Image (cartoon, helix red, strand yellow):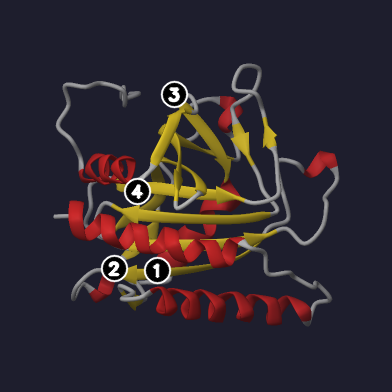
Amino acid sequence: MIIDTNRTDRPKSQTDLFQEYLSSKMRLFGKDCKSLHVFNKMIEPIEAELVTLPHYYKQIPIDYPQYAYEEGLRRIINPQVGFYKELPLRFGKIQLQVQEIGAAKNLDSAFMFYLGEGGRVGDGKTAPKTYLSKDYVGVALHENGALSAVYSNIPEIFPEELAYEPPMFSAAVSWYPKDNKELGRFAYPSSRQEVKETMKFAWDAVKEFYSQKGVNLETGSGLEMMVDVVMLAVETQRRAGN
């Protein structure tokens, strides 16, 4: 069964409340479309980080993909586009391929992402509206209050035939709210400096690992810009969370 996510008569979920607060904090300039898509590799690092924790496990929904053209992609529902501190962000609702132990459904998240160098693949008509980027930041505020962030970098231009399998290298981190230590790896950050140090440590470990394999990764501007996006998510959870 396909659920109409655009209905206005259904009760607001926690993710809906997160999205409303995010909308209030941004200078919006319209909706991108009814839905857009990102590559699996832009979401999978967040999921991989979560399932290393005992509280979560990998669970691919039985209705994924709903359509053949969505193979290898993830749908972002009710996406919006706006500026936060002059940083252009796209954000909307996404269902992760992750489930909490004992939960009846997969984890929903309010998902924000920033694209550095890159371009759109698919015009939303003949193919799904899809985004990729050389320098990419994604921040997910999960309905249970946990927070995840991923920084990805594509080290070089890749052949056109690999457009739907971009060779992205990523570092992901998760944080837990209050005393719910089972929901994330670190306690919620209390400052921009804390976010910066945590993400830099994670990314430097990825760079070091791949440098031993002959891959020289850069650190793009997105890693610095991520700090503000993570702190916005922290504020959103504290103001709009249960």
Task: State how far apart marks 4 and 3 are (Cα).
Answer: 17 Å
Question: 10 Å neighbourhood of mark 4: few (<14), some, or many (≥20)?
Answer: many
Q: Quick check: 69 above or below 62?
A: above
Task: State how far apart marks 2 and 4 are (Cα).
Answer: 14 Å
In front: mark 2 or mark 3? 3
Task: State how far apart marks 1 and 3 are (Cα).
Answer: 29 Å
Which numbered circle lies on residue 99? none
Amino acid at pointer 4:
Ser
> Which type of secondary structure does the marked residue at label 4 adopt?
strand
Amino acid at pointer 2:
Leu
What residue is disc 3 on?
34
In front: mark 1 or mark 2? 1
Q: Quadrant of the N terminus?
A: top left
Which numbered circle lies on residue 109? 4
What residue is disc 1 on?
174
Query: Where residue 135 appears, x then y in whole percent?
Result: 66, 56
> Which type of secondary structure does the marked residue at label 2 adopt?
helix
Circles 1 and 2, Cβ within 8 Å, touching? The answer is yes
The part of the image, by quadrant, that contains residue 6 is top left
Query: Where residue 103 appears, x then y in whole percent?
Result: 23, 52
